Amino acid sequence: MPVWRFDIQSNIIVFFTHVKIYPPAAKTVLEIVLASDEERNALPREEKDLLGQLVQQRTDAEAQDPTSDNDDKNDEPTKENEDEFKEKMNQLNVVYSRLKLLSSDTTASRLTQILSRLQFTKKKQHGVIENLSGGW
């Protein structure tokens, strides 16, 4: 098997990725790169799922207790669901911590800066990938 050797200047950083994608030609470079970040994309879905479960748990608890006064809505879960409620809240806090750590609210702007440094003009970043040469 041949061995490849490349002399790379010390000021150049080389990254490798394990994600191989076959993007649709109608997507932009930014859309494709943002979509490749699996964790960043999964966290908002997980947040939505956990919030839905918490709402459902609250709805179920109110439906099981016919003596509860629906006008008196407190935020405390029933005693039998308290552990499950706490676990879901812990999971939700982990999701929020990961989102904060990943700085998900600034991902697109940071990506734009990185692509600019890689000589992708704004036109190329926002253009569809079918307009680019091979390698995508």
Image: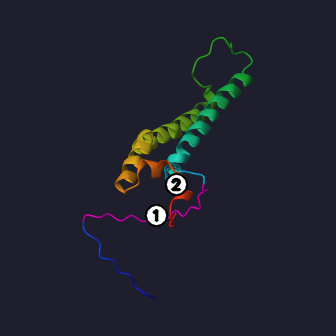
Q: Position of residue 129 (x, y in %)?
A: 54, 56
- Specify start and end residues of the magenta stretch as a single range: 11-25
Q: Secondary structure at mark 2?
A: loop
From this viewpoint, which residue is outermost toward the left?
A: 10
- Identity, as a three-letter code, of the amino acid under mark 1: Thr
Decide which of 50, 26 is in the foreground and name it.
Answer: 26
Label 2, on which residue? 36
Residue lying at 62% horizontally and 16% vertically, measured from the top left: 73
Q: Position of residue 118 (x, y in %)?
A: 37, 57
Q: Secondary structure at mark 1?
A: loop
Label 1, on which residue? 17
Q: Position of residue 91 (x, y in %)?
A: 52, 40
Above or below: residue 49 compared with residue 126: above
Decide which of 38, 124 is in the foreground and name it.
Answer: 124
Mark 1 Cα-neighbour bin, 10 Å: few <14, some 14–19, many ≥20: few
Residue lying at 55% horizontally and 47% vertically, measured from the top left: 42
Decide which of 31, 38 is in the foreground and name it.
Answer: 31
Above or below: residue 11 compared with residue 49: below
Query: Does the magenta run of residues contain 69?
Result: no
Question: CA gap, disc 1 to disc 2?
Answer: 10 Å
Residue lying at 42% horizontally and 66% vertically, measured from the top left: 16
Q: How is the structure coloured here? A: rainbow
Quadrant hosting residue 12 = bottom left
**Residues at marks 1 and 2 touching, judged by CB atoms closer than 8 Å:** yes
Query: Does the magenta run of residues contain 16?
Result: yes
From this viewpoint, which residue is outermost toward the bottom?
A: 1
Which of the marked residues, 1 or 2, is nearer the chain's N terminus?
1
